[in-house]
Amino acid sequence: MASIALIVCGAIVSIFGMIFHLQGHSVVGPTTSFMYSNPDWIDYGLWILLSGVTIILSGIAIRFLKKA
């Protein structure tokens, strides 16, 4: 059950990271947002996205190790 929770949390974090990254590129979001067209959020979004992917991979690894 913990592995599923990790995978879901990682997916949510990854989605937020992608949104933040795209806001930094001025692709999504309101123009009044402090993240909109802000180059710092391009990098922040990528790091958040990579963190989410790491969490997802941890959940998958735990799931496979429990079965073994």
Image (tube, helix red, strand yellow):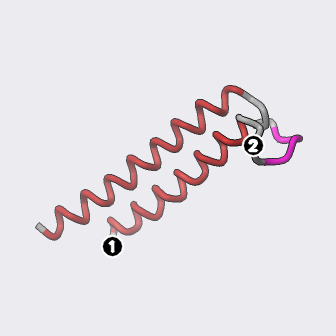
Mark 1 is surrounded, within 10 Å at the Cα level, by few (under 14), some (14 to 19) or many (20 or more) other residues, namely few
Taking 63 as reference, is 53 left or right?
Answer: right
Instruction: Identify the magenta region.
Output: 29-33
The structure residue drawn at horizontal position 76% and vertical position 47%, both measured from the top left corner, is 28
Q: Quadrant of residue 17?
A: top right
Does 57 appear in magenta? Answer: no
Q: Which sits earlier in the primary sequence, circle 1 or circle 2?
A: 1
| Mark in the foreground, 1 or 2 | 2
Magenta stretch, overall SS: loop
Kindly give the residue lying farthest to the left in the view shown.
68
- Residue type, label 2: Val
Residue 58, given in percent of the width and then of the height, sits at 31, 53
Kindly give the residue lying farthest to the front in the view shown.
27
Taking 58 as reference, is 19 left or right?
Answer: right
Mark 2 is surrounded, within 10 Å at the Cα level, by few (under 14), some (14 to 19) or many (20 or more) other residues, namely some
The dot on residue 38 is: none
Q: Quadrant of the C terminus?
A: bottom left
Q: Write down the residue under mark 1.
A: 1
Kindly give the residue lying farthest to the top in the view shown.
39
- Residue type, label 1: Met
Q: Quadrant of the N terminus?
A: bottom left
The structure residue drawn at horizontal position 78% and vertical position 32%, both measured from the top left corner, is 37
Callout 2: SS? loop
Question: How many numbered callouts?
Answer: 2
Q: Write down the residue under mark 2.
A: 27
Residue 31, given in percent of the width and then of the height, sits at 87, 41
Kindly give the residue lying farthest to the bottom in the view shown.
1
Residue 52, given in percent of the width and then of the height, sits at 46, 49
